Image: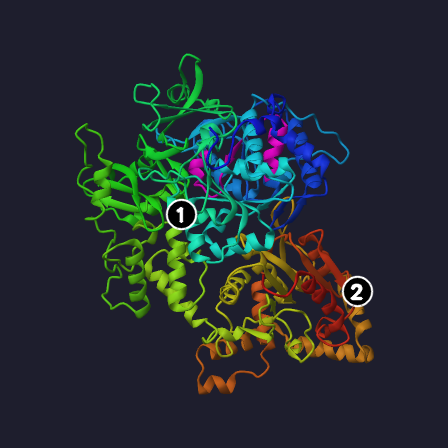
Amino acid sequence: MTPANGYTPGPVLAMHAGEDMLAANVAALFLAQARATPAAPAIVAREGTTSYGALATRVTSLAHALQQRGVAPEQPIGVLMQRSADLVAVLLAVMHAGAAYVPLDPDDPPARNRRILASSGCQLVLGDRPSIAAVRALLRDQAGPPAPEFVELDHLHPAQPGQPAGPCAPGGRRLAYILFTSGSTGEPKGVEIEHHSVVNLLFTARDLMGFTPSDRYLAASTIGFDISVAELFLPLIAGGSLLLRDRRIWLNPRQLADDIRTQGVTVLQIGPSVWSIALNDIPDFPLVRVAISTGEPVPPALARRIARAGEQAWNLYGPTETTVWSTAHRLTPAGSADENARAISAPIGRPVNRTTIAIIDDTGKPVPAGVRGELCLGGAGVARGYRGNATLTAERFVTLGATGERVYRTGDVVAWNAAGDLEYFGRNDDQLKIRGVRIEPREVEAAIGGHPGVAQAAATWFDGAGSRSIVAAIVPRPGHTLTPTALHAWLETRLPAAMIPSRFVFLPSLPLAPSGKVDRNAIRQSLAAAPATESADTGGVFREMTQTEAVLVQVWQRLLKLDTVGLDDHFFSIGGDSLAAVKMITEVEAIFKISLPVQTAFEAPTLRRLAERVTRANERSPTGSESNYLFPLAEVPGSRPLFFSNVDLRLAVRDTWKAPCSLYSISHWAQGSGFMQAESVGDLARLHLERIQQLQPFGPYRLAGFSFGGLVALEMARQLRLKGETVELLFLLDPMQPFRTTREPQGLAQEGLVTPLDETWRGRISRHVRHLSRRPGGIGTYVAERVYWHARYNPVKQWLIYKLVHLHGNRPNPVSQLIVPRNRWPAFWYSARRMAVRYVAEPYHGRTIAIFPDRGPRFQAWSDLLDPQAELHFVPADHRLLFAEPTLSQWLKPLEAALQERGGAET
């Protein structure tokens, strides 16, 4: 029978992925594509674009380094890294060398990653320094078997240029990776996947979607989630490209839509919960060529909306044990021709290439069409088994029928409908699927049971505010008082965020069914009678709520479906989850007419703290009293602005600024004539970004800085990229020389950089000669200026003026008005230097233009910090004359050219 949705699995794919192709190593398929199109873009990340040729060079170099270390066939190698092009290179290099990668998530608690390393038998872990530091410290401090060797990628000595790498290892039945999922014993279990299964998946997906070299796939899933296998490797074996993003983009629908539009994304895969929020919050959500829903059941009404989001749309289903996707169903705006009202989702379709299906009853016998049973999957995608767990492997991977075919028992209940498609009806056990993550209640219960105040615990699902969530029933030990917030904090160090319950119910005993098992349905029913709030107010002294708090209470009650909410209740322990947080922040922004990043919900998870953030955001709104440290010098309506720290106001002169975008000045003066409440460059950058992101909530961002402002701009760029935002351009105008810097590859803070405060006497003479040659009026004028300069900027005088200015700014009164100096620049330099001497500048990789007056120590220091591709220009002039003509026009040219090149208008 030909499926009604027009997809015929099998014959077409068989022509492209024969048995010889299934024997290939995944890395070999990528290298073959790289040889064919070396100049084509392979990975587009926030730090830049990597071509196929450059990625292939990196992969073979790293693979050679692993081979030189004597990596054994199928040796498990842990990978613990932040998302970058190097992450993809490492995964391919591990497979190239014949080993199997074990993905580890830097955002997971170190204790869980430690358990994964022990269970997988990893003796080697590759990663970046920040990611591996916590796990390495945990293993070092605990007794047990020898810890694996942790190797920072910069210390994995690659092959020298021209040094041949060893041949790519065989694929076929060799292990490609070991991916850990939630375990029913309370510990994660490792699924072993072989190369032939991955190759079959990639060619199946390629032909199912019609993937071509012109396609770009948005890759945002953590490598600890099986969908990452398709996101990362499908584009690279098909000649397309992948847009590498952090999974936090799922919590930012506007940024997601912006990236799809501006970065040319054609293939988008997200879960139904994220689809629902994106399509609700962004009415004009961009159309993609291929829209994919996967990971959890998709309600039929939502399925019809997803179908309108892509030229073609698919509901794809498959467990990790059968290599990502096993069935496919084409979604249409009109819905299925036989949409079964009994099902909880749109159909999951029919088997993909080289996949077989059996539906069995409790005795293991096949059931007739239309009758529900357990879904069993066989074929090329079936995993080897569970790492080091023969008992569980034998239980879940079984043989069926006279042919003795090996299949995986999914535990999912399905039935064939009249159209020949599979309908999904849920689970036959207690396993949960929360926002695409498979969760065994036993692992959640084991983590909760480790709390000294918990006697018993049971976990199940409930329909929360954002999507399906987890509820835990707790029986406290006698004499112990437990709160949702305390339990949430306890679990944050033991479970991934997706596995932490959103609600806690405290009971004298766990409800039991007649069979003696925990009655999880009764736990769900108890939610209606159990208060989610911990207290009405734990502040100790009664006070009436502020107007802001009262409004937030109403938002939380409506969103979380609660009767009461206390000021100190924790959003994520009274029913909220990450998707509910997106809805909540969106509502708050609309009510208060402010702009808040979604991260605010995680940084201020209690109602009291969130109210404080809302109040501060209101005060810093464009009409607020704190807005005078960020203001426009030139406005171009509809453009993406350039935010310039410590810029000279002469740029506001008519016709001086000719770039096609608005220009904003950033100062660290604040209320009155005082300084912003910042003790460090990091604090100052954070305060600036709060105000900047009110004016421009999402990237790409354009930042600039002059002198001390250069350090602030560098730090703002660093903080934005840590949040997953794009920094399109960093412009530095004779930036202050850092006192301390972190240099690659050692990653150690190194002091001793030459500055005007500690340079040698020869350096001082050289510097004075350079300045003298640029100053009109001869040596007499220059000496007079230097004497005046030292008198004006005497450290004691600076400190005194700083104190007077700061006092007047914070507590203006008639006396302070009389004694505050008119010349406040010495106070500025005191404040700036006080922060600069403590700041450790880190290397920056990204589009940068920097202007220097010469190749002196300042230029040398910044050359070490900036990207090798940074544009460095020289404009001979004294530091204080950079905003005077003719020097001003000279350095404005490359800046305006860069802004013109990237376009001024918002996209």
Q: Which residues are magenta?
A: 88-114
Q: Secondary structure at mark 1?
A: helix
Q: Which residue is mark 1?
A: 302
Are the residues tagged 2 and 1 within 8 Å (C-beta)? Answer: no
In the depicted view, which residue is nearer to us: 158 or 740? 158
In the depicted view, which residue is nearer to us: 185 or 421? 421
765 falls in the magenta region: no
- Measure how far apart labels 2 and 1 are at the Cα level: 70 Å
Figure quadrant of residue 472: top left
Q: Secondary structure at mark 2?
A: helix
Q: Which residue is mark 2?
A: 766
Q: Residue sitting at 37 percent across and 32 percent down?
A: 417
Residue 27 appears in the rendering: yes
Disc ID at residue 67: none
Identify whether 750 is placed above or below 104.
Answer: below
Which x, y percent locates residue 123?
Answer: 53, 28
Q: Amino acid at mark 1?
A: Leu
Which x, y percent locates residue 881?
Answer: 73, 74
Structural crowding at the residue carrying mark 2, measured as other residues with C-alpha within 10 Å and reported as few (<14), some (14–19) or many (≥20)? few
Mark 2 and mark 1 lie on one chain; the one further toward the N terminus is 1
- Closest to the camera, between mark 2 and mark 1, is 1
Figure quadrant of residue 445: top left
Total labels drawn: 2
User: Colour scheme of this structure image?
Assistant: rainbow
Which x, y percent locates residue 711?
Answer: 61, 62
Q: Amino acid at mark 2?
A: Ser
